[in-house]
Amino acid sequence: MNKQQIFKKRPVGAADASTWSLEKNPIPELEEGQVLIKNHYISLDPAMRGWMNEGKSYIAPVEIGAVMRAGSVGEVIKAKNHPTFKVGDFVSGHGGVQQYVATDGKGYYKVDPNLAPLPTYIGTLGMPGMTAYFGILEVGKIKEGDVVVVSGAAGAVGSIVGQIAKIKGCKVIGIAGGTDKCKYVVDDLGFDACIDYKNEAVKERLKQECPKGLDVYFDNVGGEILDAALGRLRMHARVVICGAISQYNNKENMRGPANYLSLLVNRATMQGMVVFDWAERYGEAGQQMGKWMAEGKLKTREDVYDGIENFPETYNRLFSR
Amino acid sequence: MNKQQIFKKRPVGAADASTWSLEKNPIPELEEGQVLIKNHYISLDPAMRGWMNEGKSYIAPVEIGAVMRAGSVGEVIKAKNHPTFKVGDFVSGHGGVQQYVATDGKGYYKVDPNLAPLPTYIGTLGMPGMTAYFGILEVGKIKEGDVVVVSGAAGAVGSIVGQIAKIKGCKVIGIAGGTDKCKYVVDDLGFDACIDYKNEAVKERLKQECPKGLDVYFDNVGGEILDAALGRLRMHARVVICGAISQYNNKENMRGPANYLSLLVNRATMQGMVVFDWAERYGEAGQQMGKWMAEGKLKTREDVYDGIENFPETYNRLFSR
């Protein structure tokens, strides 16, 4: 049987037990040209919260009654005359929150488990890593000597953003929640500093850490941290809008950045990004990041949890921790 | 004697009778290398509200006790060995809200009253016109066929922004307050449409006028109109942040654009601008706009009021009308 998390109800505010239901359905029979993939790992991303909302966004919403959408990496265990994938291949794509998926392979690509552990292909070498890479290099346009601030600094995207900025010769300040995360960001990832927004005044600490202001702010969180960062912009600063996890579970309106006129005062730019736009260059980014990983310059860490049935609780850890 | 409006008290919220005091002081004696200018016209701009606030901005705040800062155009009536200006020259600069100013001429430049009426040199051929020109062309990066939305469309900046966009082959929708202003924007300035925010629902009307969304939004107002425009962005849209008149008199916090994640969904850019950055190219812009005016493609209109003593009421019309 195939355990699946079926999307049942669009949440208002945070997702909860009523958002999905765990179902066991037969493992699908293959049609001509399809493969059956056994998902080994699925990716849990804050962006999932957005996919559950109705309305126009950068990707169609998950339909009620469908398997919950998720990035995944797994192994081809059956194939019916598939043109490119064969049994034993490891592939990554959007396999969903389920154990098995039958697909024609569209959107999937092969990965090599000998070059990196499978979870890395949905982490640093997957969407979060690609988002970090193109976000900080192409949208943030960092250059040596820049002062870079990253929120969600211990997260899958933020941790890579900051390390790439360090590799490129920037001064990097992270913002994360809690002493342990901040210690990890500084001691293990090599950021120059990390501000603990749960225990420190972000605005004042940013002033200390960037006395002359910041050149690039990479935002994963929105809310008052975005406002604090806007208050520290240098001339011609770039603000990369990658996400807004602090706002995703709002029941009321989003909070907009009240300090946005700092863009005017400092002739600064705030630009939104969606990683899919760089799909043609994922290969180049993967090679570069793989090289940095091999050289020990880019560290990667995954939090791995077991069991499709535990998906709702594990997903909510993204917002509560 | 020299009538001057002296800045007395930093306003909280809107400026009022206590903000300035009218003083009569002797016309200053010239020092070596100075000229005495008789101001014929001074420019009243929403930006003045920002100049009265303490704290870091794109320009130093007006000091308490100083003559209120204002752009001006006037005539040199005395000169004491000035290297470039002589009696009879007409010059523009920041002469302040007063009848006479003694200056070494720094920041002033000559204008020709035979080519355009004097008020035009602090309007379309002055800061508002330069702001419009570089804002829509260099920051907005308009191209033929773009859908352009401009707030403050009947104002000194917005009216020029929209006309330049029309000259460049864009579809242009203005937003202005009141039937008369909207009629002027469409009938006299040639915008394709104008939304009356005082009597119409901006969000719904924008949907009608830009069914496929907008490519460039030029914002002079902020607040809910900015949010409505953000809700209509097309892919890769550009939002030019020029001002936020709806927020300048707020006693509490600024209202931030709650719809800012539309920048992410649409891979769009929001960029702030200050006209001074293009000072080296004012000549080029003035020539081009003068040419368009001569060809009848660019219309210009000034609201002229009489009397330094009436400055406070006249200034407040910027916010009340």
Image (tube, coloured by chain):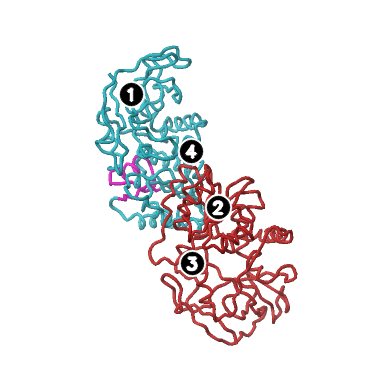
Chain colours: A cyan, B red
Q: Which residue is mark 3?
A: B50
Count residues near mark 1 (Cα–Cα under 10 Å), then give few for <14, some for 14-19, many for 20+. Answer: some
Up/down of A313 relative to B243, above or below: above
Count residues near mark 4 (Cα–Cα under 10 Å), then give few for <14, some for 14-19, many for 20+. Answer: many
Q: Which residue is mark 4?
A: A134
Residue B41 x/y as whole percent:
63, 75
- Given residues B107 and B183, the one toward you in this image is B183
Up/down of B188 relative to B78, above or below: above
Q: Which residue is mark 2?
A: B149
Instruction: Pick the quarter of the image with the N terminus of chain B.
Output: bottom right
Q: Which of pointers 4 and 1 lies earlier in the amino acid sequence?
A: 1
Q: Which residue is mark 1?
A: A40
The span from disc 2 to disc 1 (Cα, nearest Å) is 49 Å
Magenta stretch: give its range: A173-197
- Given residues A81 and A110, the one toward you in this image is A81
Residue A27: name its quadrant: top left
Tell me the mark number nearer the camera, choosing from 3 and 4: 3
- Given residues A4 and B59, the one toward you in this image is A4
Residue at image location 60% in from the left, 78% down from the top: B306
Circle 2 marks a residue in which chain?
Answer: B
Q: Inspect the magenta stretch and tell me whether residue A111 lies in it.
A: no
The span from disc 3 to disc 1 (Cα, nearest Å) is 58 Å
Residue at image location 32% in from the left, 38% down from the top: A10
Residue at image location 52% in from the left, 73% down from the top: B315
The span from disc 4 to disc 1 (Cα, nearest Å) is 27 Å
Count residues near mark 2 (Cα–Cα under 10 Å), then give few for <14, some for 14-19, many for 20+. Answer: many
Q: Inspect the magenta stretch and tell me whether residue A189 lies in it.
A: yes
Secondary structure category for the residue under label 1:
strand
Q: Is residue A104 left or right of residue A11?
A: right
